[in-house]
Amino acid sequence: MLIESRPALDPELAALVTAQQRELAEAGAGTGRIFEPHDDVEYLIGVVNGRAVACAAWQALEDGVAEMLRMYVRPAYRGRGLARQMIVAVEEEALAVGRPVIQLATDLHLPAAIALYQSSGYRQIPAFGDHAGDPGSVCFAKRLPALVQ
């Protein structure tokens, strides 16, 4: 899979996020908030055979911390390790700019996502930011190893 950085208003990114939001709603998960692109978020697209099939994003929070956002892989492409590749890409980008801690939130109704994050080294933490007070949110964090120079 080729992983590319894309601008917030990229149409392929928008299609992936729309699919993600539809799937979350069908699962009874998510906040129902409409996706609003932000210039302070780094967006990544996973491309297989010329088709955008995965996305992820990250945003700088307080010193040394980034939040992973918008993790999604189209259903037909799941089970191939693409989500793990997207996680690694987010981690590498965040670490390269001095963000060795990654936080994220997912939904209680998404056991596969919870299992993915746990198996990728993420540990459950108290809800943070907009997720605090949301009983459906499950938050995780991971401290990344330092870059070897």
Image (spheres, rainbow, N blue to C red):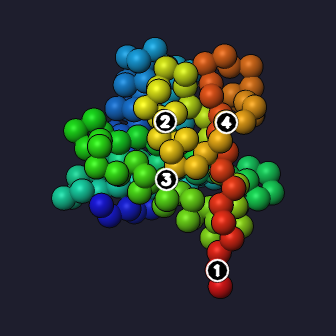
Which of pointers 1 and 2 lies earlier in the amino acid sequence?
2
Which of pointers 4 and 1 lies earlier in the amino acid sequence?
4
* Towards the viewer: 55 or 137: 137
Number of dots carrying numbers: 4
Q: Nearer the viewer, mark 3 or mark 4?
A: 4
Please give left or right for residue 5 compared with residue 102 in the image.
left
- Per the model, the C-alpha gap separating discs 4 and 1 is 27 Å
Residue 100 spot, x, y in % from top left = 70, 61
Given the image, on which type of amino acid does mark 2 rest?
Ala
Please give left or right for residue 100 compared with residue 79 in the image.
right
- The label number, if any, that marks residue 115 in the structure image: 2
Given the image, on which type of amino acid does mark 1 rest?
Val
- Per the model, the C-alpha gap separating discs 3 and 4 is 16 Å
Q: Residue at x 43, y 52 (%)?
A: 84
Q: Which residue is identified by label 4?
A: 124
Please give left or right for residue 127 compared with residue 77 in the image.
right
Residue 24 spot, x, y in % from top left = 43, 24
Which of pointers 2 and 3 lies earlier in the amino acid sequence?
3
Residue 89 spot, x, y in % from top left = 48, 61
Q: Quadrant of residue 33?
A: top right
Q: Which residue is identified by label 3?
A: 87
Which of pointers 3 and 1 lies earlier in the amino acid sequence?
3
Q: Residue at x 47, y 48 (%)?
A: 56
